[in-house]
Amino acid sequence: MRRSVATLAVEEFLTGPGCPFCGLQRETEKRFLGSFFREMVMDGDCRAGLAREGLCTRHLRLIGEAPDKLGAALSLQTLVESAKTRTGRSGCYVCRHIAEALRQYAQIVAELYLEEEGRRKLAEAPAFCLPHTELLLAVEMPRLAGKKTEEFKTFCRERRRRTLASLAEDLARFIRKFDYRMAGEPWNGTEEAVARAVLILTGEEGSETLPR
């Protein structure tokens, strides 16, 4: 498998903490918004797409908080002008670009599965959150066919099963610690069980700050 920049990014996040796709999502959002203010906000096609699709609440807030106040004002001007002629929005301009990048990353993960070394890296990677597991199960994988497709999907489902089983065990231990009879028992790493459960069930929303 040829190692592109995107492939190297996937492999990097497979060795990091937390869901690899949540990490890729944070990095993709940060990079896209940085480019948005440096180059795209002055581009006619970009502003047309922004006017057509709008922004979700999260990305509208992030752009409003951006240190580049001129870029923020230009973006908001586009949104205000477009709001004069339509109601509602069709989606989010930023979210769509992030979703397209994540689909490409999902295809790369599927291609890694074709190689023995890639399967080892995937097996050793941190758990994928449930939303990104669904992404892996649903994405089109051109190089996988027949048996390999089913093997990959089985691999993803089995990882999901093990992740949820481990999470259920940690939560049960966490809950038992609130019984006074268990007060002296060790936490055994379950202190963060609640926060970990939320991240596994929902995934991370993304980076909370724009690049400066």
Image (cartoon, rainbow, N blue to C red):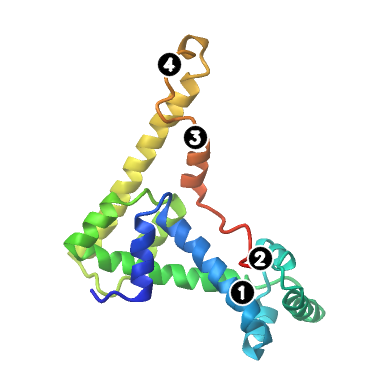
| Contact (Cβ within 8 Å) of mark 1 with mark 3 | no
Q: Name the residue under label 3.
A: 192
**Dot in front, 1 or 2:** 2
Mark 1 to mark 4 CA distance (whole Å):
50 Å
Q: In this view, does 143 lie to the left or right of 57?
A: left
Mark 1 to mark 3 CA distance (whole Å):
34 Å
Marked residue nearer the N-terminal end (1 or 4): 1
Marked residue nearer the N-terminal end (3 or 2): 2
| Contact (Cβ within 8 Å) of mark 1 with mark 4 | no
* In the image, farthest residue toward the bottom: 44
| Contact (Cβ within 8 Å) of mark 1 with mark 2 | yes
Q: Name the residue under label 1.
A: 93
Categorize mark 2 by other alpha carbons within 10 Å: few (<14), some (14-19), many (20+): some
Q: What residue type is labelled 4?
A: Glu
Marked residue nearer the N-terminal end (4 or 2): 2
Mark 1 to mark 2 CA distance (whole Å):
9 Å
Marked residue nearer the N-terminal end (1 or 2): 2
| Residue 59, label in figure | 2
Q: Which amino acid does label 3 sit on?
A: Glu
